[in-house]
Amino acid sequence: MSLLRHLMADMAIDIPQELIGTLAQARRVAVLTGAGISAESGIPTFRDALTGLWANYDPQALATPEGFARDPKLVWEWYAARRASIAGVQPNPGHAALAALERHFDKFTLVTQNIDSLHQRAGSREVVELHGNITRVKCSREEILVSHFPDDESPPRCSCGAYLRPDVVWFGEMLPAEALARAEEAAEHCEVFFSIGTSAQVYPAAELPLRALSAGATVVEINPERTALTRHARFALQGAAGSVLPQLLAKLATASA
Ligand code: BJW
């Protein structure tokens, strides 16, 4: 985390009363999260200049089906190392605030691009995973999930003989159809849409806040940096999710009391 981010993490953010008023009236809320919400748990983002994964690793080699076909062992071991490091981290106050926020609304859909299960571990009840989950493993040929496999090879093989791979979505692959449909439905029918900790560069996830905007929702961004979405957002709360979300939750609780 940069020095600026450290300082921002503890800062009180000016959360507009107009936003709290809008939220207090809202019944349907959708949220899209990205790597930034897990940054304060110690999981690196992808595109942050010095600390992002893509600053140090080649996404074409590690996060595409072509990269896996070229060097399955490299890709399997990179994901195994990330899986092990994610298993050792904890949800942060941003995840916890989102889990608490869902109780304020009739319909609350939490859509994540993250593969780390931290929303579920923080207590969020329904999480729509757009890019899969690193804890699951599937057959690279049949696409079925596999929970038990011999681990004497790297990557291990499915009983059909094909390599196993992590159940995540790589560049050039389709997103899980049901998850994408639920996310689009939530974006198009919410009154308030939050985009939190995502650079809004990867499609089709990046399209969701724009769909919400076109359908008339109030779009709110929470991010310490400006993104491709910032100029479209009605409210851009410039700060760390682990600081802004608990403050927003506290203000909403006071307004609803
Ligand atoms: C904080 C913070 C704090 C820091 N608090 N914030 C249309 C136009 C152009 C291209 C395409 C298009 N449609 C499809 C494409 C191709 C491609 C794409 O979008 N490419 C772009 C890069 C240009 N998309 C795909 O291939 C997708 N498939 C698809 O569309 O299928 C149909 C199709 C295929 C081919 C052609 C056309 C159609 C699949 C995308 C899969 C993405 N997979 C990854 C890897 C997952 C597994 C793994 O973890 O290894 O998903 S890539 C990576 O990026 C990961 C993330 O989920 C995703 C998004 O990243 P995210 O979460 O936004 O992270 P960052 O690092 O970018 O941003 C972090 C943000 O947090 C920053 O803004 C910080 O400031 C902020 N932050 N600390 C709050 N404390």
Image: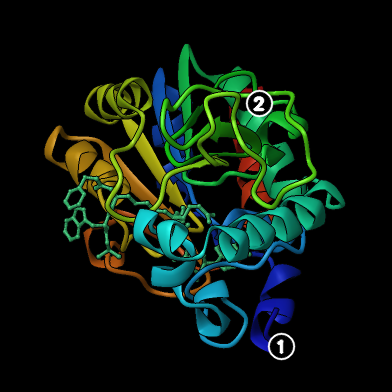
The secondary structure type at the circle numbered 1 is helix
Question: What's the residue at 42%, 25% (across, down)?
Answer: 142
| Residue 144 relative to residue 245: left or right | left
Q: Is residue 63 above or below residue 117?
A: below
How many dots with numbers? 2
Amino acid type assigned to the residue bearing label 2 in the image: Ser
Which of these two is toward me, 38 or 21?
38
Residue at mark 2: 124
| Residue 20 relative to residue 103: left or right | left
Q: Is residue 135 above or below residue 108?
A: below
Question: What's the residue at 41%, 33% (across, down)?
Answer: 141
Amino acid type assigned to the residue bearing label 1 in the image: Leu
Which of these two is toward me, 81 or 2?
81
Residue 81 visible in image: yes
Which of these two is toward me, 217 or 207?
207
Q: Residues within 10 Å of mark 2 (few under 14, many from 20)?
A: many
Q: Quadrant of residue 10?
A: bottom right
User: Which residue, as the protein is rendered here, is positioned at the far front?
Assistant: 161
Q: Quadrant of residue 50?
A: bottom right
User: Which residue, as the protein is rendered here, is positioned at the far top?
Assistant: 106
Residue at mark 1: 3
Could you say where residue 47 lies in the image, as x and y percent from the top left? 47, 74
Q: How is the image coloured?
A: rainbow
| Residue 196 relative to residue 226: left or right | right
Where is ligand 1, by quadrant? bottom left
Could you say where residue 72 lies in the image, as x and y percent from the top left? 54, 58
User: Which residue, as the protein is rendered here, is positioned at the far right?
Assistant: 88
Which mark, by number, is residue 175? none
The secondary structure type at the circle numbered 2 is loop
Question: What's the residue at 62%, 24% (across, down)?
Answer: 146
